[in-house]
Image (cartoon, rainbow, N blue to C red):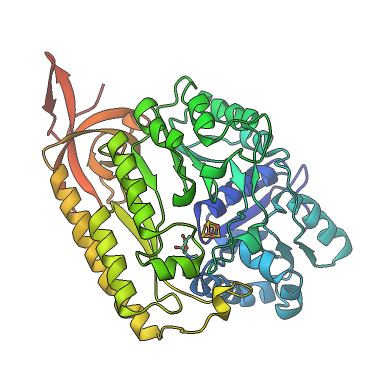
Amino acid sequence: MRLPNDSKVGRLFIRTFGCQMNRYDSERLVEILGKHQWELVEDYRQADLIFINTCTVRDKAEQKAFSYLGRLKPLKRSRPDLVVALGGCVAQQHGEELLRRLPHLDLVVGTHSIREVPAMIARYETTGERQASVGFSYDFGDEVDGRSLASRPEVSAYVTIMRGCDNFCTYCIVPIVRGREVSRPSKEIIREVESLVERGVRAVTLLGQNVNSYGLRVTGEPDFAGLLRLLARVEGLLRIRFTTSHPKDLSSSLMHCFADLEPLCPHIHLPVQSGSDPILQLMKRGYTRAHYLQQVRRLRAIREDVAISSDMIVGFPGEGEDDFQQTLSLMEEVSFESIFSFKYSDRPQTAASRLGGKVPEEVKLRRLQTLQSLQERLTMERNKAQVGEISQVLVEGPSQAGGSQLSGRTPHNRVVNFLGTPQLVGEELPVLITAAHAHSLEGVVCVKESSSLHAVKERSWCGK
Ligand code: 5AD
Ligand code: SF4
């Protein structure tokens, strides 16, 4: 491959695995490489550079990335000029060793090295030497400038407010591969949100491994509640969400934001992981079951309708049947809106990987299935209770179902599909919920008529 130049545009294909943090990093890469005449293509066979952004939080995620990489071998053999790059947490974890293990890999890009990619490509092109960059850098650099080049942002956008994590939950590899916790300056965050809103974004999701500890270690910066209060003033910003929150750091000032700030959506992702005290202690989560439940009660006393979602791990080392039953009963007690649930998986260098009492795979699987069917029931009950209600839906785009169906989200983060025209994308509309499904709701748009709301059912309805 020759480097992109005045007469040639480089073609970039990205495959992203894992969390929102990775999706955000992939977006940044598109923008950074966009400045160097790279454009995104949808077919990897057309690409000059294939970038695989990986996740290592569970073994399965890591294996998926390696198997994808393995499938690129024949293509690289037939086109030696193709550049194959591996980024994200797997790259950070294994570093330069990957270049030795995988002869068809050219670049290894660690979690803090996205900005280095243009220079890495240039060095590789001029010297022919395969490159690895896995150092940690704790400044946010030109994140905002990169963003300002984005062609047309979606209705909702992610905004990173912090990186890394200092909690060292015993099962988790994140502090090892994403580094120490660092908060991004509030002025930069506000500037980025303002610029996104100017270009049509209506909703932002603030990202960090533990947003509740935002700003706590920096003098002169607001804490997370303070940051939310500043962002709530950005004109034209309809909705603010954030993820992820640690229950031990959920402050009462943050809880009050849910009552005070109009744009703050009444939804919180508050991972509990387990309902059993001995397991929470082995996980080093820093709270008990009773404390978690108390936090939930306090939050609901301030904002009754707040939707709470969670992450759950089954089969953590030492988890017995009683511990698992405690998890199920906590789920019933909280009645989570939705959950992400995982079988515990040993991760290298974590404290839990050295614990005894490993739970057999088939027991983990059975517990996972039991937990998921309980959650399906809880979600279904909640969805059914929405039928007949009118919700404000922010229209995000065409629905996956196709046709003239649009898809949007309620403030509680429930997905609603309904008939409508593409001009409605970006609007916030009242929608009457008419049916409940396992993972979404169905509705019809309402229009205001002599101060009462009427549902519009005709297929040909054309909005305003
Ligand atoms: N095994 C299983 N699940 C894990 N998670 C993190 N590490 C592990 C692990 N070793 C889950 C937690 C976390 C989510 C992002 O991934 O539930 O909240
Ligand atoms: Fe991992 Fe715990 Fe940090 Fe979340 S809070 S990223 S689970 S160490």
In the rendered image, the residue lying farthest to the right is 127
Q: Between residues 298 and 142, which one lies in front from this camera angle?
A: 298
Q: Between residues 24 and 458, which one lies in front from this camera angle?
A: 24
Q: Residue at x 40, y 86 (%)?
A: 360
Q: Residue at x 44, y 65 (%)?
A: 280
The number of callouts visible is 0
Q: Quadrant of residue 195?
A: top right
Instruction: Residue 414 in the image: state x and y as whole percent.
Output: 28, 45
User: In the rendered view, would you say 394 is above or below 273?
Assistant: above
User: In the rendered view, would you say 75 is above or below 251?
Assistant: below
Q: Residue at x 43, y 79 (%)?
A: 318
Instruction: Residue 249 in the image: state x and y as whole percent.
Output: 49, 46
Q: Between residues 35 and 108, which one lies in front from this camera angle?
A: 108
Q: Residue at x 25, y 64 (%)?
A: 329
Would residue 253 appear left or right of 329 to someone viewing this image? right
Q: Is residue 436 visible?
A: no
Instruction: Residue 251 in the image: state x and y as whole percent.
Output: 46, 40
In the rendered image, the residue lying farthest to the top is 450
User: In the rendered view, would you say 352 is above or below 448?
Assistant: below
Q: Quadrant of the C terminus?
A: top left
Q: Quadrant of residue 183?
A: top right
Q: Quadrant of the N terminus?
A: bottom right
Q: Is residue 145 visible?
A: yes
Would residue 344 appear left or right of 133 to someone viewing this image? left
Would residue 72 appear left or right of 297 to someone viewing this image? right
Instruction: Residue 96 in the image: state x and y as whole percent.
Output: 76, 70
